[in-house]
Image (cartoon, grey):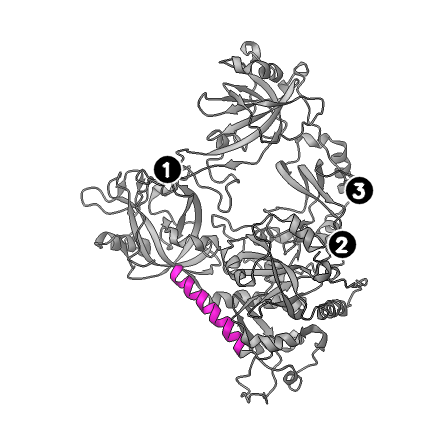
């Protein structure tokens, strides 16, 4: 951020950096003790920067020495409006970044102009970072105290190991519970959403306690429904929790609420079931301690008319009355609610509290269930996609309150389960849960005991790009199934759609165009290409602040244009045997936001352009590779097709987007139980705090792929022949993957059938045979206007993938 740009004006509300003050003891500040590096120890870079700030007449400085620091935490919170703000602003989420210089740790405020570095997962925990400009934001209510603000940074590589033993320079940053540096909000939010409980304000220590009911007056829910509007005081309720909803965060900058949370409980007694709303500070205190099946004694609650548009979940017992005219409100005040968990051993039969009736179904029963049917499932966890939350083991899990979605008219038939607002997932701690007495759960546990761990681990898959549910078979049905302002996206708008996506966000768009090139990339090379892409991306596209971001985008366009001009034959793939190539002969091709490492067998000379042997040309015609290759390469005639239209138009393009790279995270991997922690970290979201690795972690590329096919690079030319985009197509075929039987993407939508022969050990020709069939099918679409359904995925740290999910040709657009 340039020196002329305005600095944040709002003052901090919590202890930040402590600046020297000649009128008081430098060793202490209100709210914390300031540690000083000893004379014998290494000098702290953080301390030196603070001294520069105090000596500077400005509110910002450029450090005289820029040294790398380690990022230990990136924490998010909502910054509320200041009193002088006359117009309420939209929610402004701020980030506190904890850094370490090896001597001290310091919690700093990230200037909002750099928030995009977090959105794109460029600024993240565990990396090396250089700070080239800092400023100070003073707390005018505390003497000599302020916050260190990061105004300009350069984000570097991930560090192998970072010590967490370094102390905070300001001990106020170690206080519990943790508090944000700015604003009146008392807590941090989860880094990537507002619904997950995060931080030390969420208590888990509420335990059942026996209660003396001699002096407690109890009212039934049905009686309360009839009399609540005429009452001022309400007797206690004795109820059982039947459902528990997700958290809802409703914080806004103009709302002066400490913990703006809300959650719904569906509770019942013998007379009916009703919704209970838990508000604000009660949520951090009770949410993680309450679970379905607990018996509660509720006192000092309030009652109000129910919200008319909220759909209550179905009662567990159809005989129980569903009360929808009122809601029970629990709050820390007005009045202060009293909640007591009653031990199950104290529950008396005469209370006639309803028992939990689960709706467990087996896979064989699923086909006969109606649309929107609510059910529970128990099964073995055999697949976890990359955008799922961490799954700690291969184990059996329980998921309750799932809704069935089906469409028998769609081809292929659509049938799957999805979560509801009341869904709960149980992976560990099954003992003591109310569902353990269900007969289907008992049968499953008995069956699982007959299995060996090796049987399940062998078929377990983690990670990868897996689009589901599939789109309808015709474009008209697709048009009716999506709810967007504009059904079609102009190919000139695709770049902006890509740049607007944040970390782990995904968007599906539809574009019109003409398929002009398709190229098959076998799996082994695909993994190597993606790995090299990441290496080259880090080397050639360092992440910095906004000014550098604009330079990177401009340079990316220049690189794209240069790539077009320098490659008269288009990007070629040569699937030679990898072992026969030395590392020096694996040439690098930088391709816009994705860089490729393509193993090209180099001849001794290049007669086309007269290159010297020590400077081989990486853009060579296919014929030139056959003369000097050490070892015999496979034939590649069927691995690539290029239309005459492309040869005519590719040099006149005004823009060519290259997003056909398939990164290691997008390839499903065989699950290895011993490496479960590493694998779940790779496919989970980036954490808010640094977690030291256990030993030297492996590389994701070292894990065997669970998919036997490679992928295709497809070039789609816009209808106006001015812009083209390279995208990836992943065939969903694997002999061990049962899910692929329901995925029919590229082949049938072009009215072309492909036979999948049974794979036999050592049959490495099968993927190429299938690749040849797919490429042959594409040739039938030469010059045909198609609609392509694209999935755009932002993997973070400048890694973006665009997948071709479906093609609608003229035969299936209506």
Q: Which region of the structure is painted magenta?
A: 545-565
User: Which of 698 and 309 lies nearest the eye of the viewer?
Assistant: 309
Mark 3 and mark 2: Cα distance apart in space: 16 Å
Residue that badge 2 annotates: 741
For label 2, the SS is helix
Q: Earlier in the sequence, mark 3 or mark 2?
A: 3
Q: Is residue 573 visible?
A: no
Verify whether residue 555 appears in magenta.
Answer: yes
**Mark pair 3, 1: CA separation:** 54 Å
Q: Which residue is mark 1?
A: 184
Q: What is the secondary structure assignment of the residue under circle 3?
A: helix
Nearer to the camera, 299 or 702: 299
The answer to whether 560 is drawn above or below residue 393 in the figure is below
Residue at 81% x, 63% y is 757
- Which quadrant would residue 293 be assigned to in this image? top right
Q: Is residue 571 above or below residue 798?
A: below
Which residue is rendered at x = 61% and y = 46% of the image?
A: 392
| On-image quarter of the C terminus | bottom right
Residue 364 disc label: 3
Number of other residues with Cα within 10 Å of mark 2, as a class: few under 14, some 14 to 19, many 20 or more? few
Pointer 3 local density, CA inside 10 Å: few below 14, some 14–19, many at least 20: few
First in sequence: mark 3 vs mark 1: 1
Q: Position of residue 796 (x, y in %)?
A: 52, 57
The kind of secondary structure the magenta stretch mainly shows is: helix
């Amino acid at each position: 951020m340039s020196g002329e740009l305005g600095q944040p004006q709002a003052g901090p509300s919590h202890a930040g950096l402590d600046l020297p003050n000649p009128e008081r003891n430098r060793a202490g500040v209100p709210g914390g003790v300031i540690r000083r590096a000893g004379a014998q120890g290494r000098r702290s870079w953080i301390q030196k920067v603070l001294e520069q700030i105090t000596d500077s007449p400005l509110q910002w400085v450029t450090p005289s020495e820029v040294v790398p620091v380690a990022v230990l935490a990136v924490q998010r919170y909502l910054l509320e409006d200041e009193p002088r703000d006359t117009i309420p602003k939209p929610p402004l989420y701020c980030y506190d970044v904890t850094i370490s210089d090896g001597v001290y740790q310091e919690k700093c405020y990230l200037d909002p102009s750099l928030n995009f570095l977090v959105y794109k997962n460029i600024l993240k925990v565990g990396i090396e970072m250089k700070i080239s400009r800092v400023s100070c934001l003073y707390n005018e209510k505390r003497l000599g105290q302020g916050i260190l603000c990061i105004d300009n940074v350069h984000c570097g590589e991930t560090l192998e190991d970072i010590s967490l033993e370094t102390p905070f320079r300001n001990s106020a940053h170690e206080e519990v519970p943790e508090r944000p540096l700015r604003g009146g909000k008392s807590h941090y939010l989860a880094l990537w959403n507002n619904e997950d409980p995060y931080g030390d304000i969420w208590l888990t220590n509420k335990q059942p306690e026996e209660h003396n009911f001699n002096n407690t007056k109890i009212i039934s829910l049905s009686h309360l429904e009839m009399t609540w509007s005429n009452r001022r005081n309400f007797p206690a309720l004795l109820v059982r929790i039947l459902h528990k909803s997700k958290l809802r965060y409703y914080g806004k900058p103009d709302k002066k609420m400490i913990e703006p949370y809300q959650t719904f409980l569906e509770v019942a007694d013998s007379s009916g079931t009703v919704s209970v709303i838990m508000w604000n500070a009660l949520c951090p205190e009770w949410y993680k301690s309450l679970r379905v099946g607990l018996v509660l004694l509720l006192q000092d609650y309030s009652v109000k008319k129910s919200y008319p548009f909220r759909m209550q979940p179905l009662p567990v017992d159809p005989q129980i009355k569903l009360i929808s005219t009122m809601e029970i409100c629990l709050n820390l005040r007005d009045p202060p609610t009293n909640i007591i968990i009653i031990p199950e051993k104290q529950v008396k039969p005469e209370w006639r509290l309803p028992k939990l009736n689960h709706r467990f179904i087996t896979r064989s029963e699923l086909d006969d269930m109606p649309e929107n049917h609510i059910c529970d499932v128990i099964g073995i966890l055999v697949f976890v996609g990359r955008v799922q939350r961490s799954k700690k083991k291969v184990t059996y899990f329980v998921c309750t309150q799932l809704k069935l979605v089906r469409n028998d008219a769609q081809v292929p038939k659509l049938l799957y389960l999805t979560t509801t607002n009341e869904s709960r997932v149980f992976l560990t701690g099954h003992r003591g849960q109310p569902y353990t007495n269900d007969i289907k759960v008992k049968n499953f546990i008995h069956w699982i005991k007959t299995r060996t761990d090796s049987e399940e681990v062998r078929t377990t898959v983690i990670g990868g790009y897996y689009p589901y549910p599939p789109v309808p078979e015709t474009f008209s049905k697709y048009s009716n199934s999506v709810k967007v302002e504009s059904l079609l996206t102009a190919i000139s708008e695709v770049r902006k759609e890509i740049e607007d996506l944040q970390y782990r966000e995904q968007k599906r768009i539809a574009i019109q165009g003409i398929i002009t090139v398709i190229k098959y990339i076998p799996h082994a090379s695909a993994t190597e290409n993606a790995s090299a892409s990441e290496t080259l991306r880090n080397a050639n596209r360092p992440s910095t602040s906004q000014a550098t971001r604009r330079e990177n985008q401009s340079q990316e366009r220049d690189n794209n244009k240069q790539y077009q001009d320098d490659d008269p034959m288009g990007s070629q793939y040569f699937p030679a045997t990898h072992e026969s190539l030395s590392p020096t002969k694996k040439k690098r091709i930088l391709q816009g936001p994705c860089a490729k490492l393509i193993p090209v067998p180099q001849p001794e000379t290049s007669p086309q352009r007269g290159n010297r042997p020590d400077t081989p040309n990486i853009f060579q015609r296919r014929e030139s590779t056959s003369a000097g290759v050490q070892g015999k390469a496979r034939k590649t005639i069927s691995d690539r097709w290029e239309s005459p239209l492309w040869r005519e138009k590719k040099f006149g393009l005004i823009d060519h987007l290259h997003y056909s790279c398939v990164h290691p995270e997008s390839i499903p991997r065989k699950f290895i139980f011993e490496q479960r922690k590493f694998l779940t970290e790779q496919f989970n979201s980036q954490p808010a705090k640094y977690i030291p690795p256990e030993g030297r972690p492996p590389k994701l590329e070292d894990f065997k792929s669970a998919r036997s096919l490679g992928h295709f690079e497809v070039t789609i030319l816009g209808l106006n022949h001015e812009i083209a985009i390279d995208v990836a197509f992943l065939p969903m075929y694997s002999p061990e993957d049962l899910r692929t039987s329901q995925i029919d993407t590229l082949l049938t939508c072009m009215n072309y059938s492909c036979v999948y022969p049974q794979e036999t050990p050592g049959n490495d020709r099968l993927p190429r045979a299938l690749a040849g069939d797919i490429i042959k099918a594409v040739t039938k679409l030469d010059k045909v206007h198609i609609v392509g359904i694209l999935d755009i995925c932002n993997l973070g740290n400048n890694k973006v993938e665009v997948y071709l999910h479906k093609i609608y040709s003229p035969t299936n657009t209506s």
